Image: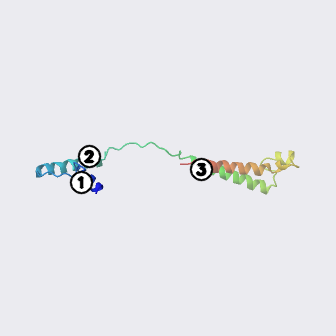
């Protein structure tokens, strides 16, 4: 019962009130339609959009770096680690750096891959 009294005493909003005057109702409808039209109005003047992505050369450069790394690894396997840099085989024949050319090839490929992760 208390809830129904609160609901009954609640004042009506201006949108839900109706005027008995048809001219006022028509003016109200026109005002609402004009405000909607103003909200939906779009400017047809073209504007230059600022480029937010990466430059056009970025993705091809990163793919090229990855291919260079792949070729580095292939050349290392074909020449048993002596090329492209013979330093590792000559100076580190007995330790883990004997595979330094492989490490460099994979690092070069990873740099290209990490660069592609930042491409937009």
Instruction: Label 2, secondary structure: give it.
Output: helix
Q: Answer with mark 3 or mark 2, whichever residue precedes in sequence.
A: 2
Quarter containing the N terminus: bottom left
Relative side of 96 to 105, left or right: right
Element type at marker 1? Answer: helix
The answer to whether 74 appears left or right of 3 in the picture is right
On the image, the x and y values in percent for residue 61 come to: 60, 47
Tell me residue 33's x, y (percent): 22, 50
Q: Can you tell which mark lies on residue 8?
A: 1
The CA distance from mark 1 to mark 3 is 62 Å
Residue 46 occupies quadrant:
top left
Residue carrying label 3: 117
Query: Circles 3 and 2: CB distance less than 8 Å?
Result: no
* Sequence-first tag of 1 and 3: 1
Q: Position of residue 53 (x, y in %)?
A: 51, 46
Q: Residue at x 20, y 47 (%)?
A: 31
Q: Residue 92, how many percent across, how many down?
A: 86, 46
Circle 1 packing at 10 Å, graded few (<14), some (14-19), many (20+), is few
Q: Nearer the viewer, residue 6 or 47?
A: 6
Of the two numbered discs 3 and 2 in the rendering, the one whose residue sits closer to the viewer: 2
Q: Residue at x 18, y 49 (%)?
A: 28
Q: Residue at x 69, y 48 (%)?
A: 108
Whole-number angstrom distance, CA of label 1 to CA of label 2: 36 Å
CB contact under 8 Å: marks 1 and 3: no
Q: Nearer the viewer, residue 31 or 53?
A: 31
Q: Which numbered marker is on residue 38?
A: 2
Q: Residue at x 24, y 54 (%)?
A: 8
Element marked by disc 3: helix
Mark 3–mark 2 distance (CA, rounded to whole Å)? 43 Å
Q: Nearer the viewer, mark 1 or mark 3?
A: 1
């Amino acid at each position: 019962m208390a809830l129904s009294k609160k609901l009954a005493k609640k004042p009506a909003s201006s949108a839900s009130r109706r005027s008995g005057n048809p001219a006022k109702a028509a003016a109200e409808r026109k005002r609402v339609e004009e405000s909607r039209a103003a909200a939906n109005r779009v400017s047809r003047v073209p504007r230059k959009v600022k480029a937010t992505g990466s430059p056009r050369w970025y993705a091809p450069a990163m793919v090229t770096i990855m291919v260079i790394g792949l070729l580095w690894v292939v050349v290392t396997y074909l020449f048993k680690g002596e090329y492209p840099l013979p330093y590792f085989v000559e100076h580190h024949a007995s330790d883990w750096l004997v595979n330094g050319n492989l490490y460099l090839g994979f690092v070069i490929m990873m740099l290209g891959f990490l660069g592609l992760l930042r491409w937009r």
